[in-house]
Amino acid sequence: MTEQVKLEYQGKIFEFPVMRASTGEECIDIRELRAKTGLTTLDPGFGNTASCESGITYVNGEKGILRYRGLPIEIVAENMTFVETAWMLIYGRQPTLSEMKQFSQRLTNNELLHEGLLHHFDAFPANGQPMSILSAVVNSLICYSPEIMDTTNEEALRNAIAAIISKVRTIAAFSYRKAVGLPYVYPDPQRSYCDNFLHMMFSLPNKPHQPTEEAIKALNLFLLLHADHEQNCSTSTVRIVGSAETNLFSSVASGICALWGRLHGGANVAVFEMLQSLVQEKETVPQFIERVKKKEVRLMGFGHRVYKTFDPRAKVLKKAVLNLLDAEHVSDPLIEKAQELEQYALADDYFKERNLYPNVDFYSGIILRALKIPLNMYTVMFAIGRMPGWIAHWLEGNQGIRRLARPRQLYIGKTETKFVPLDLRMPE
């Protein structure tokens, strides 16, 4: 028999079933709350509200656990590529060798942009925001491939999924090239996913760029670790937009816009703006740490809203950071300042007691800096990595019985206002 939670209200007892997650957590099912009681719930930020049932990603912030489709993130990072991880997140299981070859071929087949799309880049100013360009062009893809609108067709849906994952890196690279006045470099079908992106970013017509193996591995790891993270702001946005039966391209474009926020995808940018300030003002790390303790400034890249211990993604990235810096022989005052800041903070009881450990944004920023990705492209890189998760959640949200997302509110405005003609209204 299902366990029930009892609510007493106005002398009546109401019962609501308790649902149990596969990992053991329990949740009160309040879908019939308003119908039974006339009440709704107020939960700003949805910190205590499960908006859906999902089988994609599991996060336990108290224990520092992150799993993709049941696989611990540490095992995924050690054994899988970003492309393989993308397939697993989207289709629900680990792919076979044959399925991986087919998926990789689909990505290759869809890596080019329609030439008509290139005019979009010409219309944006050179200093245009890359996230704005990315969102606009991703949303425009549907205009050039209307056949992939029919997601009831399995083949068209698979091509649409591959098109987004493949073309997003081409769009990102082209937007960068346009901004710096360099000619577009087309994707090379012989290169891997990450190798190809770095090629499109940094090759010249007379000098192809060949990234090191360490650089390719680091980028692959960066994208893989950002592939999904449960019901965060941008993922919830994709699911809400998708609940209106909005097409896949427009739904993920909305996710890009949500990710743009400084408190979400822009966090790794904030880390390096903090480091730039430290270097420019010639403030020592101990001086800065003391100001953090006095709450005069914020320590960006430490702590996490979900994780109450070390972010498991940060543990994986830290090792990759060290390998990359060693292999690339990087000499950068900002990275040196970041490493010094990390050492001081990890050794200070103030931060230990408050569980303020470096998070994924701290180390991902160092990796992107070492790869010479410009600061205004950091959130774009996050979007490329998060694309498989958005697609997986869009698919999951559109399976079975669809329900249009329509949150309630607690209205606190005037109940009724008297109309006053315009010429008789007095200033307040």
Image (tube, rainbow, N blue to C red):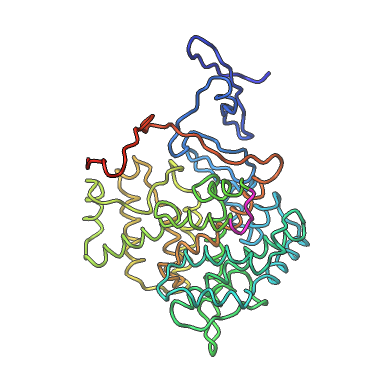
Closer-to-camera residue (19/234): 234
Query: Is 249 included in the stretch rendered in magenta?
Result: yes
Which quadrant: the C terminus?
top left
Q: Position of residue 109 (x, y in %)?
A: 71, 71
The residue lying toward the viewer, choosing from 318 and 112, is 112
Quadrant in the picture for the N terminus: top right
| 182 to the left or right of 281 | right
Given residues 170 and 333, the one toward you in this image is: 170
**Magenta residues, as a range?**
245-250
Tell me if residue 312 comes above or below residue 196 in the rendering: above
Q: Name which residue lies at 67% across and 46% down.
A: 398
**Residue 410 % position (x, y):** 43, 31
Q: Quick check: 302 left or right of 33?
A: left
* Residue 53 sits inside the magenta stretch: no
For residue 388, above or below residue 373: above
Q: Position of residue 244 (x, y in %)?
A: 61, 47
**Residue sitting at the far bottom:** 206
